[in-house]
């Protein structure tokens, strides 16, 4: 397994019972709906997923992860990364692995900074967070309470509270490809949330866990530029492009 898999989600997850309105369903946009799109290679993987529309979140769990390596800035990520891309999310799929939440999101590549992924390509990225359908949760992980959960209920699970991807969001993604048989041709971010930068109005930022807001403040490392242009130059200088 490649460097990106250098974390283990603890099986003990703290759950809280929640009551919220039914959720909207999965959404997606076609690449040809995005102006200026260049046709590329379709690298996406068909995912067995479930629709969350109309279902109620009855429990929320926030899991912790143990990392073998921390990445204080984009330069530190670059060495362990197979591909670096700028991309827009075009579809989100909610699924599970042995009863644990997994979200897959398809992205359309706008820029390629490292690796063989090209502009206009589409590919699938995995995030170990999301929603587990209630009946699947009860069947594979046991009862939570006196009665099993139903297919109309959801359990939400987040690693370190990292937000889930949404259609239309733009990211800089530091990727590697999983080499496990069940995850063939699926990508994931190096260092989990550390390998995903959100782009908004030309600015870039990474998620910071609430209980560790100084996670990227490591002595001896230069802080990331706060703009897309600045980060692009920092990575290019590292790669000697």
Image (spheres, rainbow, N blue to C red):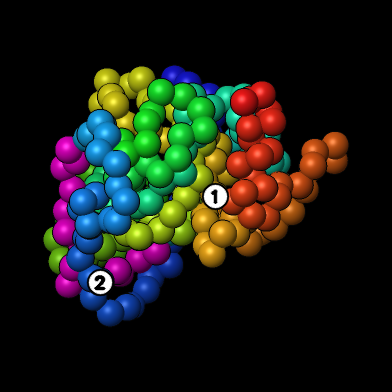
Left or right, residue 213 beside residue 17 = right
Rate crowding at label 2 as few (under 14), some (14 to 19) or many (20 or more) other CA atoms within 10 Å: some
- Circle nearer the N terminus (1, 2): 2
CB under 8 Å between discs 1 and 2: no
Q: Which residues are magenta?
A: 46-60
Q: CA distance from mark 1 to mark 2?
A: 26 Å
Q: Where is residue 147 shown, x and y percent of the image?
A: 20, 64
Left or right, residue 71 beside residue 199 = right
Q: Which element carries disc 2, helix, strand or loop?
A: loop
Rate crowding at label 1 as few (under 14), some (14 to 19) or many (20 or more) other CA atoms within 10 Å: many
Q: Nearer the viewer, residue 200 or 44?
A: 200
**Quadrant in the picture for the N terminus:** top left
Q: Residue furthest right?
A: 220
In the picture of the structure, the residue carrying the numbered disc 1 is 197
The residue that appears at 79% across and 42% down in the rendered structure is: 222
Q: Nearer the viewer, residue 199 or 196?
A: 199
Q: Nearer the viewer, residue 151 or 84?
A: 84
Q: Where is residue 70 shown, x and y percent of the image?
A: 66, 36
Write down the quadrant of residue 55 in the picture. Answer: bottom left
The residue that appears at 60% across and 30% down in the rendered structure is: 78
In the picture of the structure, the residue carrying the numbered disc 2 is 23
Left or right, residue 60 beside residue 44 = right
- Determine the main secondary structure of the stretch shown in magenta: loop
> Is residue 144 shown to the viewer in this render?
no
Left or right, residue 23 beside residue 110 = left
Q: Is residue 188 above or below residue 81?
A: below
Q: Where is residue 235 shown, x and y percent of the image?
A: 64, 35
Q: Is residue 226 above or below residue 236?
A: below
> Is residue 176 shown to the viewer in this render?
yes
Q: Nearer the viewer, residue 18 or 25?
A: 25
Q: Residue furthest front?
A: 36
Q: Residue 59: within the magenta?
A: yes
């Amino acid at each position: 397994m490649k460097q990106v898999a250098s974390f283990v989600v603890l099986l003990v997850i703290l759950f809280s019972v929640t009551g919220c309105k039914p959720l909207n369903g999965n959404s997606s946009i076609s690449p040809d709906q995005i102006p200026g799109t260049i046709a590329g290679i379709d690298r996406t993987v068909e995912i067995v997923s479930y629709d969350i529309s109309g279902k109620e979140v009855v429990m929320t769990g926030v899991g912790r992860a143990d990392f073998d390596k921390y990445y204080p800035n984009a330069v530190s990520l670059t060495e362990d990364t197979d591909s670096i891309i700028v991309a827009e999310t075009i579809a989100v799929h909610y699924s599970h692995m042995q009863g644990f939440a997994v979200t897959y999101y398809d992205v359309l590549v706008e820029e390629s900074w490292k690796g063989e992924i090209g502009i206009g390509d589409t590919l699938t990225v995995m995030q170990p967070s999301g929603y587990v359908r209630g009946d699947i949760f009860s069947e594979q992980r046991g009862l939570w309470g006196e009665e099993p959960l139903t297919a109309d209920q959801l359990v939400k699970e987040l690693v370190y509270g990292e937000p889930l991807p949404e259609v239309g969001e733009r990211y800089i993604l530091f990727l590697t490809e999983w080499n496990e048989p069940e995850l063939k041709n699926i990508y994931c971010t190096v260092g989990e949330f550390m390998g995903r930068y959100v782009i908004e109005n030309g600015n870039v930022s990474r998620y910071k866990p609430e209980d560790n807001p100084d996670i990227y403040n490591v002595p001896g490392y230069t802080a990331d530029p706060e703009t897309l242009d600045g980060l692009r130059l920092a990575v290019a200088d590292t790669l000697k492009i």
